[in-house]
Image (cartoon, helix red, strand yellow):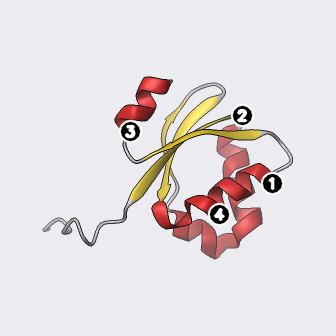
Amino acid sequence: MKSLKPSLREKKRYLLIEGAELKKNVEKAISEFIGALGMSKTGLEWIKSEKNSAIISINRNIVDAVRASLVIFPQKIEVKMVSGTLKSLKEKI
């Protein structure tokens, strides 16, 4: 199967987040704020997960909505940094 052209690929942004129980809370926060359809538009992927921090990748068109959903969520989830490349985020961990 032929790979997609770069112009057709989904553009990603990477978020460095900190908080407790991230896997459960991040998905819950996004789905409560923007719903199931919005959750599917994010293209959420878990890149690296540690005890209290994680790197996730999302679609660049919906970065603002994801950040807003994490701020509004009752349990503290903090976005430390947003980047276009994984290399710069891995240096910050």
Q: What residue lies at 68% left-to-right and 49% top-to-bottom?
A: 26
Q: Which mark is residue 65?
A: 4
Front-most of 77 and 26?
77
Residue type at numbered disc 3: Leu
Whether residue 49 is situated above or below residue 45 in the rendered picture: above
Q: Secondary structure at mark 2?
A: strand
Q: Secondary structure at mark 4?
A: helix
Contact? badges 3 and 2 (CB < 8 Å):
no
| Relative to 74, 32 lies left or right | left
Q: Secondary structure at mark 3?
A: helix
Cα separation, mark 4 vs mark 3, equals 21 Å
Residue 3 at x, y percent in the picture: 17, 65
Residue 78 at x, y percent in the picture: 70, 39
Cα separation, mark 1 vs mark 4, equals 11 Å
Cα separation, mark 2 vs mark 4, equals 18 Å
**Splitting the image into 4 quarters, where does residue 51 fall?**
top right
- Please state which of the two labelled residues, at mark 2 or mark 4, is closer to the viewer: 4
Q: Which residue is mark 2?
A: 19
Q: Who comes first in sequence, dot 2 or dot 4?
A: 2
